Amino acid sequence: MTTPSSGQNASHLNTTSTYELRCRECGKAWGNQPRSICEDCFSPLEVNFDYESIRPLISRDLFASRAPNMWRYRELLPLPAGFEPTLPVGFTPLLHAPRLGARIGSRKLLLKNDAVCLPTLSFKDRVVAVALANARSFGFDTVACSSTGNLANSVAAQAARAGLKAWIFIPSDLEPAKILGTQVFGAELVRINGSYDHVNRLCSQIADEHRWGFVNVNLRPYYAEGSKTVGYEIAEQLGWTLPDNVVVPMAGGSLITKIKKAFDELILLGLVDPKAVRFFGAQAAGCSPISTAVKQCASEIEPQRPNTIARSLAIGNPADGHYAIRAIAQSGGWSEDGSDAEVINHIQLLAETEGIFTETAGGVTVGCARKLIAQDRILPDETTVLCITGNGLKTTDVLSDKYQAEVPIAPKLVEFEAYFSAKAANAPAALEEVAVAG
Ligand SMILES: *Cc1c(COP(=O)(O)O)cnc(C)c1O
Ligand SMILES: [Zn+2]
């Protein structure tokens, strides 16, 4: 098998591939091509795998024998024949979080830390890696995306590495670090006066006019499968078992459905014992179309106009909202949302208890997990994984009024001792400890 180098050759994949696009509603097969919507019924397409042909090719030992990155699960990803990855994306730490757990009421709390995902410090590196592998084989020389920030960073970086041109479309009010962290890779950055939903609608129109690989428009079915690697890694890192609960931040609603797909696949393939995992969604109160629908027991979302500091999650009309609601409801899970103040408090709580600096989406996740535990929807002795999906260094602007820069002192011991005494005098907690010790 060779790597198809042009769009015309792509149909060649249909006969050799273990996967192809299938309509989620009418079931029609569409082969492998840059397309995300069924022309017959206008429903979304999804990559469908031939698990019977994959089953004999894989095992726990095979995966474990490979390098620690997301490509170790390559048989379960839609990758064109001959694709050779050059970036070790994924396989981020799954950490026990006893100190955070003690504060929010869980004795078996784990953090899946995609704040340190490479190359651009969010879980979006996983989806972009799969999308760009396919962009190449479909013959695109330019990739593009609409983004709430992290996708922009990842497409720009990975396009640079792959030698592809990149056009990135963002709402104009994104965090400065996410804008700079896109421009530095030499991408064309288009700021749009409007919300993400406006940007996304524009991108659908541009995709009809330009032969570009839009990672979250015409390549979206392939892109989405990259999120499954979060689920595979959690299972492998738990010794090939599944947790009781997973808490996932939601923007378009794709990640939560794909972690569920990953667990379902592992059960189907006999790689883990069957287990009913509950899925919990997390959103910001200022943009909560999915969690609002879950709380109202509705099966469809009501679009919202986003107004939140959690800009990476600020999608008012989520493409996978319906499927996210279904995944949550069918699993017996629930969804919560948190105010901007709660988001900031929980960024600080995670940092102070576990040494992880997450972006606003992580503050949403930790804050919502705390509420779900307080509601007894998540019990203290259940194994609960929180998905920390992005890095705090990209959203430092939201903390700018929380910390003051200290007045500098001279490099003299006497100056430090004076500073130290003044600090101690101003720190009530420290004084109390001294009193008890005395
Ligand atoms: C995009 C994003 C999400 C949510 O992803 P969806 O698949 O669109 O629901 C979560 N966290 C961060 C940091 C993101 O950038
Ligand atoms: Zn259809």
Image (cartoon, helix red, strand yellow):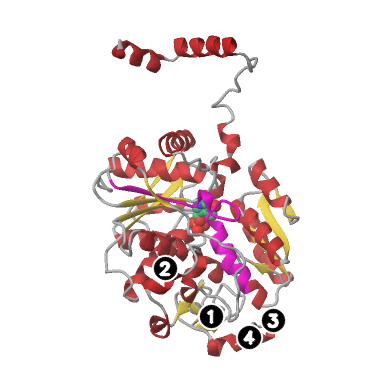
Classify residue 430 as left or right of residue 216. left
The mark nearer the N terminus, 3 or 1, is 3
Beta carbon at label 3 within 8 Å of ligand 2: no
According to the picture, the residue beneath numbered tag 1 turns out to be 40
The mark nearer the N terminus, 3 or 2, is 3
Beta carbon at label 4 within 8 Å of ligand 2: no
**How far separated are the C-alphas under marks 3 and 4?**
9 Å
Dividing the picture into quadrants, the one containing residue 368 is: top left
Task: Residue 400 in the image: state x and y as whole percent.
Answer: 59, 30
Label 4's element? loop
According to the picture, the residue beneath numbered tag 4 turns out to be 2
| Disc 2 residue type (three-letter) | Ala
Q: Are marks 3 and 4 in contact (CB under 8 Å)?
A: no
The one nearer the camera, 72 or 438, is: 438
Mark 1 or mark 2, whichever is nearer to me: 2
According to the picture, the residue beneath numbered tag 3 turns out to be 5
**How far separated are the C-alphas under marks 3 and 2?**
31 Å
